[in-house]
Image (cartoon, rainbow, N blue to C red):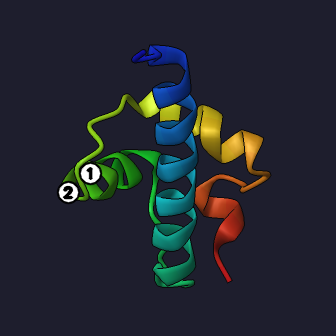
Amino acid sequence: GYNVGDDNIVSTKAIKSTLRQIIAAEDPKNPFSDDKLVAEIKRKGYPIARRTIAKYREQMGIPVARLRKR
């Protein structure tokens, strides 16, 4: 049968991998804020909340934008 829990795991993985791609492609001098990450993720078809983005980013060990600046 259809299991919402499984679907949730898949989408979490998909969102995290998309998030990783977006961050990998960002301008190192001008990294995306969480708000900008939300906008980018929405454009790719995942309308998720900023706090969710922040949570995933932390789970993935990715620091906030100002700490990613190089």
Q: Secondary structure at mark 2?
A: helix
Image coords of residue 48 (percent x, y): 35, 33
Residue marked by disc 1: 39
Residue marked by disc 2: 43
Q: Residue drawn at (46%, 54%), measured in percent from left and top? A: 33
Residue 13 or residue 53, whichever sits in front: 13
The image quadrant where one finds the N terminus is top left
The residue furthest front is 1
Q: Amino acid at mark 1?
A: Ala
Q: Residue drawn at (46%, 29%), measured in percent from left and top? A: 7
Disc number at residue 69? none
User: Mark 2 and mark 1: span between their CA atoms?
Assistant: 6 Å
Q: Residue drawn at (48%, 82%), measured in percent from left and top? A: 25
Residue 3, above or below 52: above
On the picture, is 42 further left or further right than 61?
left
On the picture, is 43 further left or further right than 61?
left
Image coords of residue 19 (percent x, y): 50, 58
Asked if labels 1 and 2 touch by Cβ distance under 8 angstroms, the answer is yes
Q: Amino acid at mark 2?
A: Arg
